[in-house]
Amino acid sequence: MQNNSKRQVAVTGIGIISSIGITPAEVTESLRLGRSGIVLDEARKSLGFRSALTGKVKELKPADYGLDRKALKTMGQPALYGCCAASDAIKDAALTPELRGSGRCGVVFGNDSCISAAVEAVDTLRREKETHFIGSGSVFQGMNSTVTMNLGSRFGIRGANWTLSAACASGAHAVGQGLMLIRSGLQDIVIAGGAQETGLESMAAFDALNAFSVQEDAPQKASRPFDKGRSGLVPSGGGACLVLEDLAHALRRGARVHAVISGYGFSSDGAHLSLPSSEGSERAVRHALADAGLAPEMINYINAHATSTPAGDAAEAKMIARVFGTSVPVSSTKSMTGHECWMAGASELVYCILMAKGGFIAPNINFEEADPECAGINVVREARPAKLRHVLSDSFGFGGTNAAIILDLEPDLPGGI
Amino acid sequence: MTREEIVEEVNKILAEQFELNPASLKEPGTKLHEELGLDSLDAVDIVVTMEKKFGCRIQEAEAREIRTLDQLYDCINKLKNP
């Protein structure tokens, strides 16, 4: 894959709602300190979950984001998370109503479920015996596109408006598609991101796969990507948003440029539904490198997908060692956040941008004993100062969908960033 | 329940659950859509909320005819005080 477009795509705004903070400043501090957002949820335990561990997002105050009853009525939890993150990102990018409503601005988010809203609707039906009592908001809350339908309406978006579902690579592919929409000239701005609900209903079926960590005695130590003692992932969620913009457009209007998205690669394993293939992920990563025009040795940090599952981390470590060798620093921020599933590919780009701004690489906490199956990669145990330029974030999902995105965090711009 | 009590209760619900300014509910002839900004989705929820509060059932055809506060009070009053 090669980028034949002359248009470059900048990130001009970011917003993040996650288990490690609900503002960029809070999240930066957590990343620097290696602070975990994982808790034990007693409600899951009493319901019969195999693992009651989860990332916990601080309670949001909708009024702080200008959300009233009417706005909230149609928002499922992913929409609330996505709207709060987008509200911050739009403010950060100084996107005026004129820019948003020009038809040259779109919204594309990754999301792959709204289970809690659907469960609530059916519970009401079973109790009341009539759909009439479900009320008017539920249908809008329970659709996968709840994030983008609410965002489009709320922010007066008149260009692209849709949701992309690709399991745990949804957020990454949404950013990738935003990039393609701008490169192709179809849009100048795309409000892109990912959202992930955190209600227990949304994770009951996933818990049944025995894929979650059961280290409940020490919740903050349960997510341990690449560590020999890892026993599974910890589900988490929130919302992440990046305002993508044609670089020339951004510079013309004097927008601040956080980063340039220099490469995107995708691939499908075409193999097992849930077992990862390091061959498929390697193709996505190599496509992203080719798209960015970079040799592997030019990448100076990898934010790994590594979710803390035995098979997934091992496959990814082998792929990283094959493509990049042993020296590039690698960390999985999921060690702190848990697995933010549908939004992870977008939130982890935000984390990379925050690290670059703070001049550090966030640690892969809980990496205590290297697993021979994950040998040959340079896992960062503690936060370390770093001047980040080219960083890669990869994301993989059920069905063998793979995404890789490369950010240029110190792009050569007229007058600098 | 008298009509006055119904009016008071309906206004209380509209103010508290539909975030309407109580001052905007003083004129019985006030139009729900044009003047109070309530849309077709709000209409669905107003019907369900009133039914639960007053223990009655508002038929779809009746609900469709409600345009003003007064018509809403009347509708409930007729069901409660036939």
Image (spheres, helix red, strand yellow):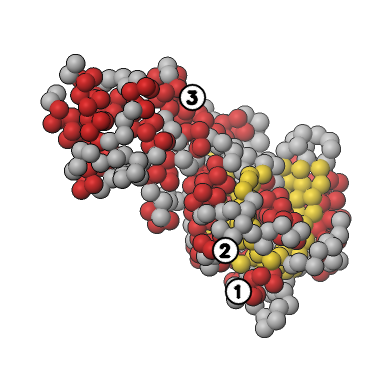
Above or below, comparing residue A225 to residue A13 in the picture:
above
Task: Name the mark on residue A62.
Answer: none
Mark 1 neighbour density, 10 Å: few (under 14) some (14–19) many (20 or more): few
Q: Which residue is mark 2?
A: A99
Give whichever of discs 1 and 2 has the lower sequence position.
2
Query: Element under label 2?
Result: helix
Q: Amino acid at mark 1?
A: Arg
Identify which residue is drawn at 41% across, 51% down.
A67
Above or below, comparing residue A198 to residue A86 in the picture:
above
Check the residue under mark 3 and report the chain it is in: A
Mark 2 neighbour density, 10 Å: few (under 14) some (14–19) many (20 or more): some
Of tags 3 and 2, the one toward the viewer is: 2
Q: Which residue is mark 3?
A: A122
Give whichever of discs 3 and 2 has the lower sequence position.
2
How far from the left and from the top, in percent, is residue A1?
86, 56
Check the residue under mark 2 and report the chain it is in: A
Contact between labelled residues 2 and 3, with CB atoms less than 8 Å apart = no
Identify which residue is drawn at 86% across, 60% down.
A2
Q: Is residue A391 left or right of residue A133?
A: right
Identify which residue is drawn at 35% across, 20% down.
B59
How far from the left and from the top, in percent, is residue A92?
53, 66
Of tags 1 and 3, the one toward the viewer is: 1
Query: Element under label 3?
Result: helix
Mark 3 neighbour density, 10 Å: few (under 14) some (14–19) many (20 or more): some
Q: Which residue is mark 1?
A: A253
Contact between labelled residues 2 and 1, with CB atoms less than 8 Å apart = yes
